[in-house]
């Protein structure tokens, strides 16, 4: 039998972190990788999954204070593991001895050799939702899940992005929070938006064409 679907089997021999298709990440595992809890959709081989939390006491403390952070699992062993998140588009980023800040909501998986930490955006109080993001440093691959293909904005002048639309940005940028409460119902795609991430310096920011997943509907009594 024939179908373009069967062409994807050709990817199965590759090792490391690769895209199986635009909505699914395949990791040819021979060791360990970190991934968002609940993101595994299939696996083949001898693979183990373990809860990692937010990684370390300091990271756990930040998560417990804000309700944010990055819920992780450790995936180890040898085999092929497939990850996805609600059919979001997946993009792989290679770090080559540099640093990148990623919105925790957009992190799908990353190689265990990367250093990472949860950092707070300067000036982001509880009213702005805490705004803790994940900073990756070193050499390795990160898979981010986005609503569609993000646009790359070069930052060479003051730049402002909705807090849920910013996917990732150069760690060299100075970040802060801008309040636009009076115009909150007029700008952005939602109603009553009052905060944006502010970027200054030289660098880039990736912006997705969405403000993230809609809130879950409340159960009907």
Image (cartoon, rainbow, N blue to C red):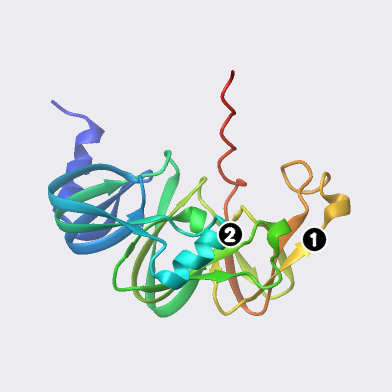
Q: Earlier in the sequence, mark 1 or mark 2?
A: 2
Residue 130 shows in the view: yes
| Dot 1 crowding, Cα within 10 Å, few <14, some 14–19, many 20+ | some
Q: Nearer the viewer, residue 127 or 104?
A: 127
Task: Give coordinates of residue 171: x percent, y percent.
Answer: 54, 76
Task: Give coordinates of residue 118: x percent, y percent.
Answer: 50, 69
Task: Give coordinates of residue 172: x percent, y percent.
Answer: 57, 80
Q: Is residue 166 positioned above or below 192 on the image?
A: below
Residue sitting at 61 percent across and 77 percent down?
173
Relative placement, left or right, of 172 versus 94 is right
Which label number is shown at residue 179? Answer: 1
Quarter of the image that includes the C terminus: top right
Which secondary structure lies at badge 2?
Answer: helix
Image-quadrant location for residue 44:
top left
Quarter of the image that includes the N terminus: top left
Residue 161 shows in the view: no
Residue sitting at 45 percent across and 65 percent down?
60
| Dot 2 crowding, Cα within 10 Å, few <14, some 14–19, many 20+ | some
Image-quadrant location for residue 96:
bottom left
Q: Is residue 133 positioned above or below 25 on the image?
A: below
Q: CA distance from mark 1 to mark 2?
A: 19 Å
Which secondary structure lies at badge 1?
Answer: strand
Residue sitting at 38 percent across and 63 percent down?
142
Foreground tag (1 vs 2) = 2
Circle 2 residue: 66
Q: Residue furthest top?
A: 221
Q: Is residue 134 positioned above or below 127 on the image?
A: below
Relative placement, left or right, of 169 versus 184 is left
Task: Give coordinates of residue 34: x percent, y percent.
Answer: 31, 60
Q: Nearer the viewer, residue 104 or 220?
A: 220
Q: Residue furthest right?
A: 182
């Amino acid at each position: 039998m024939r179908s373009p679907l069967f062409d994807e089997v050709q990817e199965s021999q590759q090792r490391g972190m690769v895209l199986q298709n635009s909505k699914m990440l395949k990791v040819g595992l021979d060791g360990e990788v970190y991934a968002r809890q609940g993101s595994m959709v299939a696996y083949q081989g001898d693979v183990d999954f373990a809860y990692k939390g937010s990684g370390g006491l300091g990271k756990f403390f930040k998560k417990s204070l804000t309700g944010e952070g990055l819920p992780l699992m450790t995936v180890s062993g040898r085999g092929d593991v497939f990850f996805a998140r609600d059919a979001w588009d997946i993009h792989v980023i290679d770090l080559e001895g540099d640093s990148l800040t990623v919105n925790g909501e957009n992190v799908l998986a990353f190689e265990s050799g990367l250093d990472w930490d949860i950092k707070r955006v300067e000036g982001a109080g509880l009213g702005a939702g805490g705004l803790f993001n994940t900073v990756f440093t070193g050499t390795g691959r990160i898979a981010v899940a986005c609503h569609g293909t993000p646009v790359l904005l070069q930052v060479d002048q003051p730049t402002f992005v909705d807090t849920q639309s910013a996917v990732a940005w150069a760690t060299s940028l100075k970040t802060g929070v801008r309040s636009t409460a009076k115009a909150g119902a007029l700008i952005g795609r939602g109603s009553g938006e009052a905060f944006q991430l502010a970027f200054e310096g030289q660098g880039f920011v990736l912006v997705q064409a969405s403000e993230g997943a809609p809130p879950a509907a409340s159960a009907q009594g």
